[in-house]
Amino acid sequence: MTGYQSPPTGGQPGAAVPSGSTDPGIDAFPLPRRCPFSPPAEYARLRAEHPVVRLPMLGGDTAWVVSRHADVRQVLSDPRMSADRRRPGFPKFAPTTESQRQASFANFRPPLNWLDPPEHAIVRRQIVDEFSVRRVRQLRALVERVVDTHLDALVAAAPGADLVSTFAYPVPSQVICEVLGVPYGEHEFFERRSTLMFRRSAPADERARCAREIRDFLDVVVTDKERRPGDDVLSRLLQQQRSAGDVDHEAVVSMAFVLLVAGHVTTSNMIALSVLALLTHPARLARLRAEPERFPAAVEELLRYFTVVEAATARTATAEVTIGGVTIGAGEGVVALGQAANRDPAVFEHPDEFDPDRDARAHLAFGYGRHVCPGQHLARLELEVALSRLFRRLPGLRLTTEVADLPLKEDGNIFGLYALPVAW
């Protein structure tokens, strides 16, 4: 199990000449991710031979897929690229009819990650201090307490367990609940719906229902905060609005939605995958155990190596723009493919190797530009604390199944594992 080798995806560095070709041999994008340690091998070929290319989308129509690191950064920072998913040309990652698409927007305030300037900056300013480096440092004790609580429960379940359901999921779920002021007792309710919401194979109506039910749940939570505020992010958001003389209940519900969902789904998948990577690289793990101060750097490499988020970097061009020598027209959809960018050999030497000693800080796992993940510092802290304390507490941790038998979220817009059986 420790000798698993992922297929190469890096290719050779060099300046491919983009052609804008529409036929690189891919029938529908995105492709399923069938190896836990690598994005689809076709993405390396795209980066080397078709770095800016129009592809048919799994949900219908076509969109431009951009795969080189420099070009992905340009897409994510260009003011002519809109993140508003209501735009007609926005890439469709899952089958959805136009009526279903319109219905999913009804009575739904667009969340932060859909907003464009100037509204985006106005809304983001409301939470930027809550997730700043300074504020997240103050949350370390909370994260350590939550991690230790779930490690205690894990040890009590000896000699083995599924690490996804007993540790990787509950840790970030409880942390984000306590930070936001959402009752953790309801975690199974929103975890199940969040998982289904990101599954491309799920019917569109079912995905929309899950989003609506989470939104309705948070509507009740925010209403309760209006009546009985606490020491939490949602209460402080409401207080900000009261001080400004304009309480916007729906805006706070929308913010709660994106923070709750993104705050547990991405980090939980990263924890499980990171444990898998370290267990299958025992020499790397041994060094981290001996020198735990190296965990923060290892977290950056793990973020680069896995790049679990796929759909958050889709955009629509609002004006004609040239990316990598290819002209993209106004109204056309664009996908900035972070999974390929983070394996770009022009930026990362031997990109398919997991190397915690490398400087991986140029990765784009949290996005880039104005929509860079606001919770990135909290996610880093959770990963560092969860991994360092898990491997310190359970030095004999090991897989109890072959890597090839692990159930993968290969059809999800956020990659991960459905289960990770371990013993110690």
Image: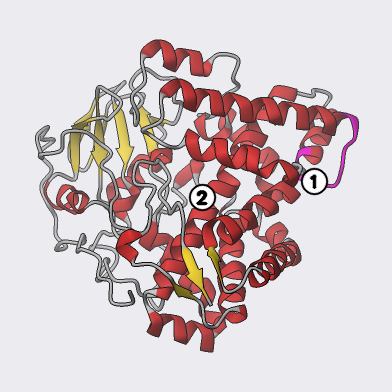
On the image, numbered disc 1 is attached to which residue? 232
Nearer the N terminus, badge 2 or badge 1? 1
Task: Give the residue type that dot 1 points to.
Answer: Asp
Does residue 422 show up? yes
Q: Looking at this view, is 117 or 171 the one in front?
A: 171
Secondary structure category for the residue under label 2 = helix
Cα–Cα gap, marks 2 and 1:
21 Å
Left or right placement of residue 204 versus residue 163 in this view:
left
Q: Position of residue 368 (x, y in %)?
A: 44, 48
| Residue 377 seen | no
Q: Residue 353 vs residue 100: left or right? A: left
Residue bearing mark 2: 266
Q: Which residues are magenta?
A: 227-234
Label 2: few (<14), some or many (≥20) within 10 Å? some
Q: Could you tell me residue 62's position as x and y percent?
A: 23, 26
How far from the left and from the top, in percent, is residue 101? 43, 17
